[in-house]
Amino acid sequence: MVTVRMEGLTKYFKKGKNIVKAVDHITYKISDGIAFGILGPSGHGKTTLLRLIAGLEIPTDGYVYFDDEPMSAPGKIVVEPERRNVAMVFQNWLCILT
Ligand SMILES: Nc1ncnc2c1ncn2[C@@H]1O[C@H](COP(=O)(O)OP(=O)(O)OP(=O)(O)O)[C@@H](O)[C@H]1O
Ligand SMILES: [Mg+2]
C-alpha cells in the first residue's frame, strides 16, 4: 500500500454562473496501512475527493501524491487512473438490462 498525500487539493465546478467549491484546498496525509473514513453532509465533497485520489477528476489546484510520487497536479492527471492501483466502489450503480 501507499501513503496518500493531498497538498492544497482543490476542485471547483461551474454551475451556470456560479462556482461550486466541492473540495477547497485540502492538505492532509493518510498514512500507509490506516483504515480511513470521510464523514460529512450530502454535497460536501466526499465523492469528489475520492474521485480526485482515484484520478477520475482533474484538480483545479493542488496535488495528489502516492508516497512521494505525484499522481495529479494543478489542471492535470500525471498518472492515469488505471495505473494507480486504486479500487473504487461507486455509490450509484447504473444497471442496463437488455
Ligand atoms: N461533475 C460535477 N459537475 C458539477 N458539479 C458537481 C459535479 N460533481 C459534484 N458536483 C458538486 O460538487 C459538490 C460536492 O459533491 P459530492 O458528490 O462530492 O458530495 P458528497 O459529499 O459525495 O455528497 P453525498 O453525501 O450526497 O454523496 C456538490 O455541490 C455537487 O453538486
Ligand atoms: Mg458522495
Image: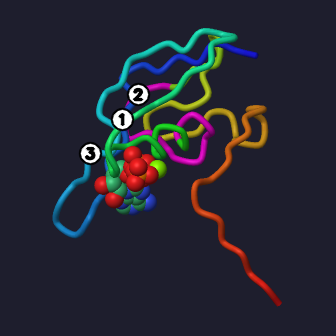
Tag 3 or tag 2, which sits nearer the N-term? 3
Pointers 3 and 1 in contact (C-beta within 8 Å) = yes
Across and down, in percent, residue 98 comes to 83, 90
Dot 2 lies on which element? strand
Q: Is residue 59 magenta?
A: yes
The residue nearer to you, when weighing 12 against 3, is: 3
Q: Which mark is residue 2?
A: none
**Circle 3 — which element?**
strand
Q: Which quarter of the rendering shows the N terminus? A: top right
Residue with the mark numbered 1: 10
Q: Residue furthest right?
A: 98
* Residue depicted at x 65% and y 65%: 93
Question: Of the residues shown, which amino acid type is indicated by label 3?
Answer: Lys
Name the spot of residue 72 as percent of width and height, x first.
Answer: 55, 32
Number of the label disc, if any, that sits on residue 21: 3
- Distance, label 2 to label 3, CA atoms, is 14 Å
Amino acid type, callout 1: Thr
Residue at 36% in and 25% down: 26
**Image point (55%, 44%), residue name:** 51
Of residue 24 and residue 45, the one placed in the foreground of this image is 45
Q: CA distance from mark 3 to mark 1?
A: 8 Å
Q: Earlier in the sequence, mark 1 or mark 2?
A: 1
Q: Do callouts 2 and 3 mark residues in contact (Cβ within 8 Å)?
A: no
Q: Quadrant of ligand 1?
A: bottom left
Task: Reply above or below: 90 against 36.
Answer: below
Q: Quadrant of residue 67?
A: top right
| Residue 26, magenta (yes or no) | no
Confirm or deny contact between disc 1 and disc 2 (CB under 8 A).
yes
Other residues around mark 1 within 10 Å, as few (<14) / some (14–19) / many (≥20): many
Residue at which label 2 appears: 62
Q: Which kind of residue does numbered mark 2 sit on? A: Gly
Q: Which residues are magenta?
A: 52-63
